[in-house]
Image (spheres, rainbow, N blue to C red):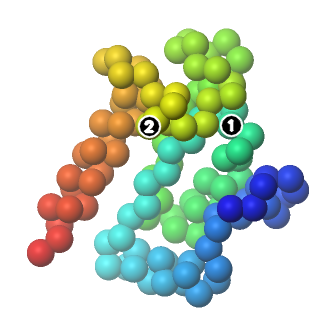
Amino acid sequence: MPAPVNARHRAAIGLDPADLASVKERTRDGLCVLGLRFSADKGSPPERFETLRRELGEAFEGIEINSSRGNPDGIPARSHSVLTLDFVDQPGHPTRAALERVLAFLGERLAAVP
């Protein structure tokens, strides 16, 4: 993905038009896209989720975890990796809830495969 150094790059999702058209076509067959990001993550700006919402509509589910200064979970603003480096394996923590949603999402999607 392009470095988010300008408005166009902040909104970029890393797909060429043909690939995006293919993804959009597949959403008609039930394809869904799940995305995770921290709210203050400069490497994954909110404009990318806005692009996905605009392009995919209800076929995009975005989970944004509060990492703003003073957030109630003490998540640092520099956090970037929701399920790895910045993951906190404690019940009730937002990253744990995100992992549980990813696992449920995969279970839903894989159960639908004939």
Residue 109 sits above or below residue 82 on the image? below
The answer to whether residue 64 shows anywhere in this view is: no
Amino acid type of the residue tagged 1 in the rendering: Asp
Q: Position of residue 61 (x, y in %)?
A: 45, 53
Which residue is at the far right? 6
Nearest-to-viewer mark from 1 and 2: 2
The answer to whether residue 85 shows anywhere in this view is: yes
Which residue is at the far bottom? 18
Residue highlighted by disc 1:
41
Picture residue at 69% right of the left edge, 32% below the top: 40
Picture residue at 59% right of the left edge, 27% below the top: 66
Q: Quadrant of residue 32?
A: bottom left
**Figure quadrant of the C terminus:** bottom left
Left or right of 25? Residue 19 is right
- Binning the other alpha carbons within 10 Å of mark 1 as few (below 14), some (14 to 19) or many (20 upward) gives many
Amino acid type of the residue tagged 2 in the rendering: Leu
Residue highlighted by disc 2:
83
> Which circle's residue, 1 or 2, is located before the other in the chain?
1
Q: Position of residue 39 (x, y in %)?
A: 64, 34
Q: Position of residue 36 (x, y in %)?
A: 50, 44
Do residues under tags 1 and 2 come within 8 Å of each other at their CB atoms? no
